[in-house]
Image (cartoon, rainbow, N blue to C red):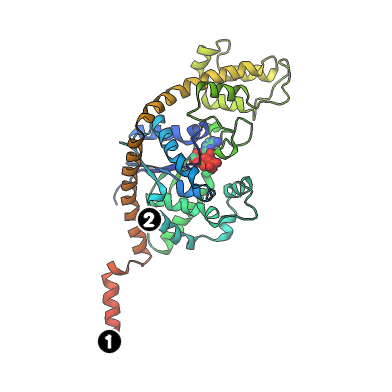
């Protein structure tokens, strides 16, 4: 048997600029994987068709954010020479695959998906869920399988989608033929990065909740957002003992700070554990912790912002990169679709045997 290729597919919805939740949840890892040289192919998708499933009345938002997401990708270090960046809607094959996969999934199974359930609630869709939104896990299965991805590096909220994809793959292969590949999810190894909370303390930083620190925020914006962050609401006076668990300021420190940051910005403490102990004991004010977090975040985000400024100078070139990537993605997806159609026996004109068989049937009856 030929050696199984190692292929990555992942992506983001162009519903806004990318934030530090995307960064720690997926983007940073993608860049590391890209540069590891261990993967045969890497596909990074701007999921505009998926974004339209809950933004049907706001296509302008989706259209405007394509370039924002692409700029964020490039400024984080995704490199078009190593990773194919493309736009979902330009690959018609993905829609076609979704249509066939729909026959392999029940409504009850979709209704059980916890992420979709939570998202429906968040968008007040309970009474009127667009069918496209309800079925987006199927379209995501099409995206992943079209490229025969083996690894999907994403945040924790995507777990039910990958599980759904694996089920579709098994069902397809068992029903028709071994064409599709079961992907594995790759979650962030740092627990705090699985689902970074918002600056407001809500469970997930999300473009739709307006509780984000964006990768492209200015130094001043980052500082204002951090100094205004939600912390332990019972930590009123500096002397009060503070709660570290579930406190977004400490979760961000878990995600971003390293021992060398302490030496540089807060030498009274060796590491994060010491800082946490002091906070829990009481006598450590929120402002001091937030100032430290600000220093750490500024250090991490400044180079990304600087690179972004460079890429912003040649916007047409970025559309070029996306166009080339989309052409390449289309070639790959089209090969998979051919295999799918032939496994499903809907490749009539290529099926010489079928034509012969039918001809014979009619010769013998005539
Ligand atoms: P929307 O509100 O439009 O759904 P979003 O902020 O949830 O936007 P997506 O484009 O849906 O962003 O997600 C893109 C990727 O980023 C996914 O892999 C997702 O798991 C990851 N991700 C999104 N938000 C977070 C977060 N707060 N923490 C960790 N990972 C995240
Ligand atoms: Mg989302």
* 296 up-or-down from 319: above or below: above
Q: How many marks?
A: 2
Q: Residue at x 30, y 73 (%)?
A: 354
Q: Nearer the viewer, mark 1 or mark 2?
A: 2
Residue 217 on image: x %, y %? 50, 27
For the residues bearing labels 1 and 2, Cβ distance under 8 angstroms: no
Residue 204 is labelled as none
Q: Residue at x 30, y 78 (%)?
A: 358
* 306 up-or-down from 61: above or below: above
- Which residue matches tag 1? 364
The residues bearing labels 1 and 2 have C-alpha atoms spaced at a distance of 39 Å
Q: Is residue 1 left or right of residue 291?
A: left
Q: For the residue carrying disc 1, how many other residues have a C-alpha within 10 Å: few (<14), some (14-19), or many (20+)?
A: few
Give residue 106's quadrant in the image: bottom right
Q: Residue at x 43, y 33 (%)?
A: 72
Q: Is residue 84 left or right of residue 279?
A: left
Which quadrant is home to the C terminus? bottom left
Q: Is residue 319 visible?
A: yes
Residue 151 on image: x %, y %? 42, 43
Q: Is residue 155 visible?
A: no
Residue 125 on image: x %, y %? 62, 51
Q: Is residue 80 left or right of residue 167?
A: left
- Choose the circle earlier in sequence order: 1 or 2: 2
Residue 311 on image: x %, y %? 37, 30
* 187 up-or-down from 298: above or below: below
Q: Residue furthest front?
A: 60
Give residue 224's quadrant in the image: top right
Q: Residue at x 52, y 55 (%)?
A: 132
Query: In the depicted view, which residue is nearer to us: 282 or 308?
Result: 308
Q: For the residue carrying disc 2, how many other residues have a C-alpha within 10 Å: few (<14), some (14-19), or many (20+)?
A: many
């Amino acid at each position: 048997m030929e050696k199984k290729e190692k292929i990555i597919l992942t992506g983001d919805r162009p519903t806004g600029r990318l934030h530090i939740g995307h960064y720690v949840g997926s983007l940073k890892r993608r860049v590391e994987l890209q540069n590891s040289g261990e993967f045969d192919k890497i596909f990074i998708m701007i999921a505009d068709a998926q974004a339209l499933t809950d933004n049907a009345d706001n296509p302008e938002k989706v259209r405007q954010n394509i370039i924002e997401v692409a700029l964020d990708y490039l400024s984080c270090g995704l490199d078009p020479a190593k990773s194919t960046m493309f736009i979902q809607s330009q690959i018609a094959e993905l829609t076609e695959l979704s249509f066939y996969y729909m026959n392999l999934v029940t409504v009850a199974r979709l209704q059980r998906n916890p992420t979709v359930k939570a998202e429906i609630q968040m968008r007040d869709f309970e009474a009127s869920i667009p069918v496209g939104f309800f079925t987006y896990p199927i379209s995501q299965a099409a995206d992943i399988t079209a490229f025969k991805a083996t690894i999907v590096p994403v945040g924790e909220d995507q777990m039910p989608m990958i599980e759904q994809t694996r089920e579709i793959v098994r069902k397809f292969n068992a029903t028709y033929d071994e064409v599709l590949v079961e992907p594995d999810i790759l979650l962030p190894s740092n627990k705090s990065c699985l689902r970074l909370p918002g600056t407001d303390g809500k469970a997930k930083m999300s473009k739709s909740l307006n509780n984000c620190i964006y990768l492209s925020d200015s130094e001043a914006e980052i500082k204002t957002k951090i100094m205004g962050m939600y912390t332990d609401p019972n930590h009123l006076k500096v002397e009060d003992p503070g709660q570290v668990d579930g406190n977004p300021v400490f979760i961000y420190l878990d995600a971003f700070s390293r021992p060398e940051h302490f030496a540089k910005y807060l030498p009274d403490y060796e590491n994060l554990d010491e800082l946490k102990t002091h906070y829990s004991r009481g006598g450590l004010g929120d402002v001091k912790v937030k100032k430290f977090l600000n220093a750490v975040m500024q250090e991490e985000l400044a180079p990304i912002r600087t690179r972004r400024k460079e890429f912003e100078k040649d916007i047409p070139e970025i559309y070029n990169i996306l166009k080339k990537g989309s052409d390449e993605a289309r070639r790959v997806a089209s090969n998979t679709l051919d295999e799918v159609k032939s496994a499903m026996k809907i490749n009539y004109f290529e099926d010489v045997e079928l034509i012969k068989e039918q001809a014979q049937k009619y010769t013998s009856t005539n």
